[in-house]
């Protein structure tokens, strides 16, 4: 059995097309089998609604009188990129407002624009003979723009990882707030409803494919950045006319201590051209697998702890080392379903036709890491010998060691060199001022530490964030194996 | 009901009798309240009490007479207008006060909230506020 795009479009025009959502398709294939399902169903609709940081919009304002060529440009105090012709700009959703960072960003500007709210435009210029105006400060709405084009270089990940945190502090990441010691788990994407999951070999998805984007009609421009089909992390480069979209499906968001982003609603229709596509679109959450990844390790290649299905992720708990960790989504399953339903309605009503892509997406692209010229240095390369005192030591001895070794930090351990605390020259001074004589009265027990395999940059960030100048280096058993101070980092 | 966070300093409660005295001091006012959380920390005992709004003054007085330290802590309030039903708060909630219903929409059972406030800085739409 095969169908063509023309046959399916004919059915749409005649009003007898059979469209179902990717979730409904699972049941149909289960009940009727692949052959019957492939014959009966013409189109399967998909949907996803989640944070997509690689999103933004090209805007054209029209020329001022006298004309201006912006050098710097702000939309509601969010810096826009201006490296194009005079009256164009690109507003990216992760750019934060100069005045309210972590509260308002480019995604919020786009949401406000689409909602019809007025946006303040402020720009300046070095002036030229052809663009003599030096400053603009005006207010406009989306209706005043010549073009407003949503243009997202990396959207609709085929699947995404599930994030957990093994470290002993709360992490604020693009995967949300991750509690220490595996306190919670977060995942993203809609699983079996995800667009690329339903056409994993990109038979029908490619350049020019017409899609649901932000509540309006959009198009796939090609593979997205970091498209990685072999590892099933395909991505899409999308565009669409912002003027047709609605703010229900474009939401500016902010992740505390991470920054701003935007939720984007994407839905793709998959034409059931053959039995293979009927089978592929019947994929269930049980069959969509991803990795549980430890964000407690701040490296590019974070440890993968296990494989997990979207079925387990959506159940509310993820099992890890025999324990059940509470798990929730960062994407909205409710809106993903609503998008698949809306697209289904458009097609049924004859308002949306399908088209074959000019070229399907690559199944070969490789996503490479950054080529770095300077060699990565680790704590073990730069650490020095820690000056250690035992916990039953006299304060005077600690003071002597500070002088003898010209070291500001003395690490306190037990006889087995297990870390117990740290004492600085300032602590000794304070003890003297406050008439304290016992080491245990002045020792700092909550010590921020480093390990041998931490990159230097990570150790430096720990010092900066905690406003300290040294970190004892410990091994997995908390045994002290050295110290790294801000002096080594300079 | 309002949640109050009470710390009974270590010096104050050397044994169970001291603790009972303080609690009985509140109970003699014939008020029923819920103890949401009881924990022993290095500085003493902390209690999370769920108290009827009109009895807060009496309880606060009784506790303060016993030198307890009181921190009023509100439950959270959800601005559903701004909520996008993502779920970023759900896994953080230790009591399932925030949960997804069968349609995958966020629901909030206020009575279950124990004002831990873990969710407040997790919301990408800033739709969770301490009351």
Image: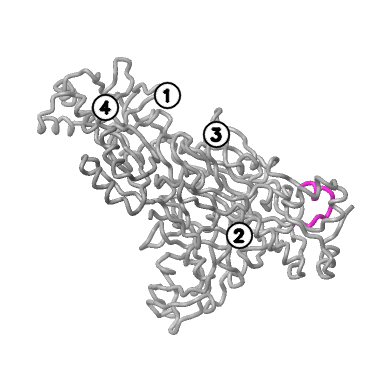
A10 shown above or below A408: below
Q: Which residue lies furthest to the top in this view?
A: A415
Residue under the point 70% across and 40% down: A287
Q: Residue furthest bottom?
A: A65
CB-based contact (under 8 Å), mark 1 and mark 4: no
Residue under label 1:
A476
Q: Of helix, strand and loop, which one carries label 1?
A: loop
Subunit under mark 2? A
Crowding around mark 4 (Cα neighbors within 10 Å: few <14, some 14 to 19, many 20+) is few
User: Residue A133's x, y, as percent?
Assistant: 40, 80
Q: Nearer the viewer, residue A234 or A478?
A: A478
Start-end of magenta stretch: A270-280
Residue under label 2:
A265
Residue under the point 53% across and 36% down: A325
A42 shown above or below A122: above
Subunit under mark 3? A
Q: Of helix, strand and loop, which one carries label 2?
A: strand
Determine if the magenta segment contains residue A259: no
Q: For the residues marked 2 and 1, what is the alpha-carbon distance in whole angstroms?
A: 44 Å
CB-based contact (under 8 Å), mark 2 and mark 1: no
Residue under label 4:
B15
B34 shown above or below A401: below
Q: For the residues marked 1 and 4, what is the alpha-carbon distance in whole angstroms?
A: 39 Å
Tag shown at residue B7: none
Q: Of helix, strand and loop, which one carries label 3?
A: strand
């Amino acid at each position: 059995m095969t169908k063509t795009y023309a046959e399916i479009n004919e059915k749409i025009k005649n009003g007898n097309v059979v469209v179902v959502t990717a979730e409904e398709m699972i049941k149909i294939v289960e009940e009727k089998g692949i052959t019957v399902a492939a014959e009966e169903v013409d189109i399967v609709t998909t949907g996803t609604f989640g944070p997509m940081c690689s999103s933004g919009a090209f805007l054209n304002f029209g020329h001022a009188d006298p004309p201006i060529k912006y050098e710097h440009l702000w939309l509601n105090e969010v810096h826009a990129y201006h490296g194009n012709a005079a009256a164009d700009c690109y507003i990216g959703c992760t750019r934060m407002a100069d005045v309210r960072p972590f509260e308002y960003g480019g995604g919020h500007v786009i949401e406000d624009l689409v909602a019809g709210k007025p946006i303040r435009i402020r720009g300046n210029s070095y002036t030229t003979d052809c663009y003599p105006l030096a400053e603009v400060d005006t207010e406009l709405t989306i209706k005043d723009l010549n073009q407003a084009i949503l243009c997202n270089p990396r959207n609709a990940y085929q699947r995404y990882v599930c994030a957990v945190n093994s470290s002993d502090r709360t992490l604020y990441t693009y995967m949300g707030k991750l509690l220490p010691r595996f306190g919670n788990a977060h995942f993203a994407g809609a699983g079996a409803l995800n667009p690329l999951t339903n056409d994993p070999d990109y038979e029908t998805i490619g350049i020019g494919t017409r899609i649901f984007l932000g509540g309006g009609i959009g198009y796939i421009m090609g593979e997205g950045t970091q498209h990685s089909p072999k590892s099933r992390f395909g991505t899409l480069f999308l565009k669409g006319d912002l003027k047709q979209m609605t703010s229900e499906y474009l939401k500016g968001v902010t992740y505390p201590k991470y920054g701003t982003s935007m939720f984007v609603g994407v839905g793709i229709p998959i034409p059931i051209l053959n039995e293979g596509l009927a089978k592929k679109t019947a994929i269930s959450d049980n069959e969509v697998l991803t990795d549980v990844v430890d964000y407690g390790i701040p490296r590019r290649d974070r440890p993968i702890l296990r494989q997990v299905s979207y079925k387990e992720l959506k159940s509310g708990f993820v099992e890890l080392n025999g324990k059940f960790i509470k798990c929730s989504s960062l994407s909205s399953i409710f809106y993903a379903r609503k998008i698949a339903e809306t697209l289904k309605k458009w097609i049924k009503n004859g308002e949306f036709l399908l088209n074959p892509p000019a070229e399907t997406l690559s199944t070969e692209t490789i996503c490479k890491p950054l080529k770095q010229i300077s060699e990565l240095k680790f704590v073990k390369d730069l650490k020095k010998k820690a000056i250690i005192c035992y916990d039953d030591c006299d304060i005077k001895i600690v003071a002597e060691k500070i002088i003898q070794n010209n070291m500001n930090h003395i690490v306190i351990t037990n006889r087995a060199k297990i870390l117990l605390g740290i004492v600085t020259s300032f602590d000794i001074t304070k003890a003297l001022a406050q008439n304290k004589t016992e080491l245990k009265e002045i020792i700092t027990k909550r010590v921020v530490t480093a390990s041998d395999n931490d990159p230097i940059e990570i150790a430096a960030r720990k010092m900066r964030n905690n406003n300290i100048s040294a970190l004892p280096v410990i091994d997995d058993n908390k045994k002290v194996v050295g110290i790294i101070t801000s002096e080594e980092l300079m | 009901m309002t949640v109050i966070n009470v710390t009974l300093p270590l010096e104050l409660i050397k044994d169970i009798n001291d603790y009972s005295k303080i609690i009985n001091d509140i109970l003699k006012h014939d008020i029923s309240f819920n103890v949401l959380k009881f924990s022993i920390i290095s500085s003493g005992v902390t209690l999370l009490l769920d108290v009827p709004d009109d009895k807060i003054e009496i309880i606060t007085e009784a506790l303060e007479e016993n030198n307890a330290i009181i921190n009023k802590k509100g439950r959270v309030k959800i601005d559903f207008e701004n909520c996008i039903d993502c779920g970023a708060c759900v896994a953080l909630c230790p009591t399932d006060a925030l949960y997804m219903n069968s349609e995958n929409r966020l629901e909030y059972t206020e009575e279950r909230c124990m004002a831990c406030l873990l969710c407040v800085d997790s919301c990408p739409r800033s739709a969770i506020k301490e009351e």
